[in-house]
Image (cartoon, rainbow, N blue to C red):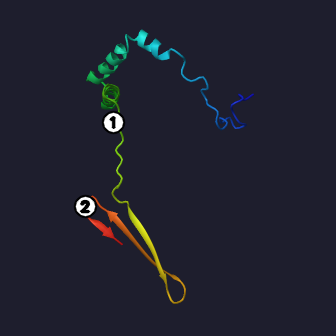
Amino acid sequence: MLPQNRDLTGRFLAGQSGNPSGRPKGFREQIKVSTADGNELVEVVLGVLRDQNASNRERMEAATWLADRGFGKPAPVRDDNPLGIGDFTIVIGDHQEDGNPIIEASFQQRFSSGRIKTL
């Protein structure tokens, strides 16, 4: 028998969580108390970082973990004018003699060299 928050295929119903209770209350405090305010966790990760026998991948993951928690994760950089993306403009002007509108289209693309290509 499927739980009430699942459909016939076993997937969660729309708007239903797989963890309705969320993280247990006091979980953070329990970790702080049992790991000397997290110092033991940091010591374990520092041990991996300093272990010459650990793989480069393990050491980099340890360094990333420490940097993210010690200095905060870097904010994503948003470029309002990314390279390769351009401005596309359509101008609809007067009508031709046959009744069709006069349409002019242009596209500008920006490159890393600073060059702008207009099509």
Position of residue 4 measured from the top left corner of the image (x, y, whole percent) = 72, 29
Direction from residue 26 to residue 39 in the image, left or right? left
Position of residue 106 measured from the top left corner of the image (x, y, whole percent) = 39, 72
Which residue in the structure is indicated by mark 2?
114
Q: Residue at x 67, y 36 (%)?
A: 13
Three-letter residue code for mark 2: Gly
Q: In this orientation, which residue lies closer to the viewer: 41 or 19? A: 19
Q: Is residue 84 above or below residue 117?
A: above
The outermost residue toward the right is 1
Q: Is residue 21 above or below residue 77?
A: above
Identify the secondary structure beneath mark 1: loop
Q: Earlier in the sequence, mark 1 or mark 2?
A: 1
Mark sitting on residue 30 = none
Q: Is residue 107 above or below residue 26?
A: below
Identify the secondary structure beneath mark 2: loop
The C terminus lies in quadrant: bottom left
State the separation of the CA atoms marked 1 and 2.
27 Å
Q: Residue at x 39, y 12 (%)?
A: 35
Q: In this orientation, which residue lies closer to the viewer: 8 or 17? A: 17
Position of residue 49 measured from the top left corner of the image (x, y, whole percent) = 29, 24
Q: Residue at x 31, y 31 (%)?
A: 60
Q: Residue at x 36, y 47 (%)?
A: 78
Which of the 4 image quadrants contains residue 66? top left
Which of the 4 image quadrants contains residue 39? top left
Three-letter residue code for mark 1: Pro
Mark sitting on residue 74 = 1
The N terminus lies in quadrant: top right
